[in-house]
Image: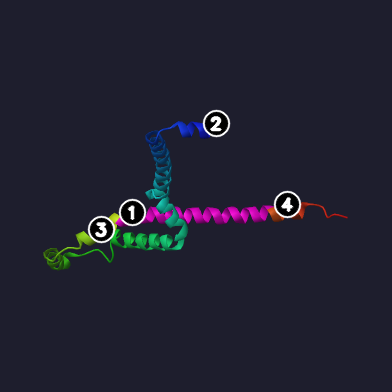
Amino acid sequence: MASQHLQRLTPKQQALRDLELARHELARETGLVAEEWSPRAVMARSFERYRYIWIAGGVVAGLAAIKLLMPSGPPRDADEDDDLEIERQQPSRGLSSGLLGLFAGPLISMGRKAVTNYGMQFVQNWLQAKAAKTADDSQPPIR
């Protein structure tokens, strides 16, 4: 019966029906591609695949941020005012430290999240293994 209906369609109607089916299929595939290549999905795959690199990057960025934010050395005295004036005349490192600070914040948070997820997974697996061992030990032996 369906074949009789298809035979009654004109070539123009068949083309329009095929076009509508193709549009629906294209919309479905576009949705899948958009979901798979969204920034969140790409970053999640990157975190899963390169977990140790993200952790190392977060640690390095954190150390760099601490180094830039914390003053180093003893406090300056009055004799060093001349040296301070010379430093002011030289070009500053403001651009490099600003860019480093701009990138350090997100890297630290991503690294912290990766470390937390890895730690939670490790602890969960360890606890499950302990619970399974305890459950096996508490069962009476079969005679």
Residue 122 point in image, percent of width and height: 56, 57
**Three-letter code for the amino acid on which mark 4 is drawn:** Ala
Residue beneath the point at 17% across and 67% down: 80
Q: Amino acid at mark 2?
A: Met
| Secondary structure of the residue carrying numbered label 2 | loop
- Compute the Cα span from label 4 to label 2: 63 Å
Going from the N terminus, do you reach mark 4 or mark 1 first? 1
Element type at mark 3? helix
Q: Is residue 42 magenta?
A: no
* Badge number at residue 135: 4
Q: What number is the disc on residue 99?
A: 3
The residue carrying pointer 3 sits among few (fewer than 14), some (14 to 19) or many (20 or more) residues within 10 Å by Cα, namely few
Residue 38 image position (x, y, % from top left):
38, 48
The magenta-colored residue range is: 103-131
Badge 4 or badge 3: first in the primary sequence: 3
Residues marked 3 and 2 touching at CB (< 8 Å): no
The 10 Å Cα crowd at callout 1, few under 14, some 14 to 19, many 20 or more, is some
> How far, Cα to Cα, is label 1 from label 2?
66 Å
Q: Which residue is mark 1?
A: 105
Q: CA distance from mark 3 to mark 1?
A: 11 Å
Secondary structure found at label 4: helix
Tell me whether the residue at label 4 lies in contact with that at label 2, contact meaning CB atoms closer than 8 angstroms: no
Instruction: Check residue 53 in the rendering and tell me which mark sits there, or answer none.
Output: none
The residue drawn where x is 28% and y is 56% is 101
Q: Are marks 4 and 3 in contact (CB under 8 Å)?
A: no
Disc 2 target residue: 1
Say if 129 sits above or below 34 in the image: below
Q: Residues within 10 Å of mark 2 (few under 14, many from 20)?
A: few
